[in-house]
Each structure stands twice: as C-alpha cells, then as structure tokens.
Amino acid sequence: LINNAGIVSGKKILENSNEMIKKTFEINSIAMAYTLKEFLPAMLEKKGHIVTISSVSGFIGTPGLIDYSASKFAALGFDESLRQELALQKKHKVVTTCICPYFVNTGMFDGVQTKFPTLLPIIEPEWASERIVNAILNEEKFVVFPWFAGLAFLLKAILPTQLYDSAMDFFGVQSVMRTFKGKL
C-alpha cells in the first residue's frame, strides 16, 4: 500500500479558505487511515508493506505551506505510530516505510525556487520513483531525499529554536514559496 495522495494550496494561512485547509488534511492525512483500515487486515494475515509519503515539509515548517506542512507532519506521525503499534503487537510481517522528499518536479510545486540547488535540488519524478522502490525493496524505515534535507532533523534536535530558525532562513526555507505557481 502506497499512501501517496497529496494536494497543496501554497497560500499563507490568512489567505487560505477553511474549506481548502480541511480538504488538504482530508487528502494528505485522513485518507491514509481509511486506506490503511481497508488493507491492513489482509496484510496482517499474510504480509505487507505500507509506504507513507510525507515530505521534508513534514518536519520543517514552511511559510506558505502551513496546511500542507501540518498535514505532512501528521503523515510522519501516522507512519511512526503505525510502526510502533505493529511492533508492540509483534506483527513483523507488515513493514512500514516513510518517505520524505524535498520538492518533486510534478507540477504540484511549480515555481518554487531553492536557494542552494546543488544541496537541495528539485527532484525529478523518475529519480524519486527509483529511490522509493529501492527503499521498499530494502525495507528501509525512513527515507529523506536529498540527503542534505535530513540534516534539518539534527539541527532541530540540537540547536536552540532561534538558531534553528536562522539556519532555516539561511537555507531559504522562508523564501522558497515566494515564486510558487503550483497546481492542485
């Protein structure tokens, strides 16, 4: 099961409608629980693999992506909680993988610009697909790409909030959505 549905408005919180915020959560987060409940019983009987597509924005809050980031934070928590629940029940025939890509060039994030494209490139869909398939085949639990984006986890854990925020500003997190055009 690959939970990969996603939408983005790209609007600041006060510019976004309540309906769009609700729709973002319904598609990006809540739908995962519904699909999981449909497929998990059969997986528990035999075996299975559940892949949750979150986002780098699921652990780095991003201006202009408040609803999207929050919904992808939820996806990250969904995967981690599910993995822990399966482990507690000793259901080792069902594997989970959480994928956290940076922006993927699918049209959804058209117009975003990365400050350091060598370190944080816009990912091509073909490369992302290959990386996800490899993660599934190798039963990796948690995958962030590009690798440099994963350093944000470490920075968030060790730096005081003010320094972390300054680092994210330096790497362009606060400005990445300024040129966003995107599409739902």
Image (tube, rainbow, N blue to C red):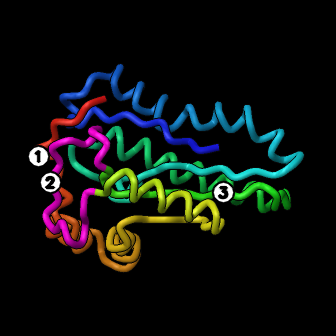
Q: Earlier in the sequence, mark 3 or mark 2?
A: 3
Which mark is in front, 1 or 3?
3
Residue type highlighted by circle 1: Arg
Quick one: label 2, few (<14), some, or many (20+) residues within 10 Å?
A: many
Question: For the residue marked with disc 2, what is the amino acid?
Answer: Gln
For image coordinates 63% across by 36% down, the residue present is 33
Q: In which quadrant will I find the N terminus?
A: top right
Q: Which residues are magenta?
A: 105-122
Q: Quadrant of residue 110?
A: top left
Q: Secondary structure at mark 1?
A: loop
Disc 2 designates what residue?
Answer: 113
- The answer to if 119 sits in the magenta stretch is yes
Lower sequence index among marks 1 and 3: 3
Look at mark 1 in the image and give the residue it sits on. Answer: 178
Spot the residue most to the right: 45
The answer to whether residue 34 is left or right of residue 104 is right
Q: CA distance from mark 3 to mark 2?
A: 31 Å
Report which quarter residue 138 is drawn in: bottom right
Chief SS of the magenta region = loop
Disc 3: which residue: 96
